Amino acid sequence: MKKIKSFHTVVILAMLLSPTLCLAQEKVGPDLKVMADTVWVLITAALVFFMNLGFATVESGLCRAKNTVNILSKNVIVFCVTSLAFWAIGFAFMFGEGNLFIGLKGLFLIGSDNSPATGDAYIGIFSSLNWTGVPLLAKFFFQLVFAGTAATIVSGAVAERIKYFSFFAFSFLMGALIYPIQGHWIWGGGWLSQLGFKDFAGSTVVHSIGGWSALVGAALLGPRIGRYGPDGKVNPIPGHNMGMATIGMFVLWLGWFGFNGGSTMAADPQAISLIILNTNMAAAAGGIAATFVSYLAIGKPDLSMLLNGILAGLVGITAGADGATVFGSIIIGLVSGILVVYSVLFYDRIKVDDPVGAISVHLMNGVWGTFAVGLFHREVGLFYGGGPKQLLIQIVGILSVAVFSFLSNLILWKIIKFFMGLRVSEEEEMGGLDIGEHGMEAYPNFTITK
């Protein structure tokens, strides 16, 4: 009886208080939405930051033991460098008020309204981000981890032969100039944005731009010693720790839920549910496709191809994760998995040495994912009755980014080469960059044979 009376008392109190609670909720509703959106943005930004661990372990696992310290160190320092470069210069160039080509205001975040009460950037500084109501500092941090990802992509393609401080210099230029200028075109209110170009979470902005930088850098550096024979034969240089590479892939897969899901910059239940599901299904389809295609192409279901197939599917869906259906995301992922295998074989054929397949994962599938928006977007895609207009706009964006990325990277890599040099000596490369560049080994108590 006491329990029943207590229950009745609670019900009566709830009924009496409910009008008051409703009024209170109406009063603080907007603030609660800003709070929820901010928490979502910061959690997903932390997931994207965590992807740095994924890149570090994938790259080091797919490379030789004698270069492990160097690769791990590059993946740590790149985010440190990019953080400062993007804060000082890059964020202003990308999102600051300016013209259709580049932002011109907001260096060092100066002149902005960082008030958490309103969550709005001062309209004359970063108005291109005013579509989301979270505080400016949350917007900045979310964009910062994306900038760091774009720079990190380059690390794997130039692994095992680049000078440490040359990569350090490039990372700064990437975060300050190359990434933000093109990002302004698409996400900062620039000319591609005005044209109607769609890239929801960065198949072009992050992955293609990072992929073009990786391609130019790898081509200028030349292949690792012994990678290609005089007759053009490809000599395998296996990674030293496939367990580490597999762990890294799963870290990246997890982080991608934040990468794509957080790009709503709002805790919208329906939107983020679809985006995260699409992200997962594309990754799964990419892994399956790469497994079967590697079996057909090289005679074995290669684990490194499986890992890169999953990552390729993730890159491919990134541009259209918000607009594709689940079925469409699976098709995008399947094509990504096929592309990555044949792309790896193609770049080996033309003797562009990419130790981890970064160019094939990020550049080739960044282009494919951007193109796929014009086909699979359920509102404007060609396959959904949208006509060819969006597809043509996507092609314009792909080509313009390709030209600017290639030329700007060529200039900046050449400048670094002139002043600092790019490649370590033959003796250092043969002995391993761990000892040559850092004076330490990752596995000091083991005998290293390669």
Image (cartoon, rainbow, N blue to C red):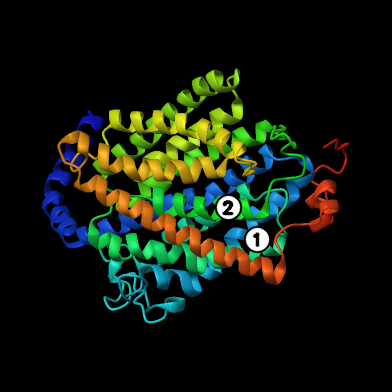
Residue at 72%, 48% in the rendered image: 160
Residue at 41%, 80% in the rendered image: 110
Is residue 316 shown to the viewer in this render?
yes
Q: Quadrant location of the C terminus?
A: top right
Q: Where is residue 86 in the image (x, y as percent from the top left)?
A: 49, 68
In the rendered image of this protein, does residue 300 appear above or below residue 304? above
The residue sitting at the bottom extreme is: 111
Q: Is residue 23 left or right of residue 61?
A: left
Q: Where is residue 387 in the image (x, y as percent from the top left)?
A: 16, 41
Q: Distance between the residues labelled 1 and 2?
A: 9 Å
Q: Position of residue 15 (x, y in %)?
A: 12, 45
Q: Do the residues labelled 1 and 2 touch (CB within 8 Å)?
A: yes
Q: What's the mark number on residue 167?
A: 1
Q: Is residue 66 left or right of residue 2?
A: right
Residue at 16%, 41% in the rendered image: 386
Is residue 138 shown to the viewer in this render?
no
Q: What element carries label 2?
A: helix
Q: What's the mark number on residue 154?
A: 2
Q: What element carries label 1?
A: helix
Q: Residues within 10 Å of mark 1 (few under 14, many from 20)?
A: many
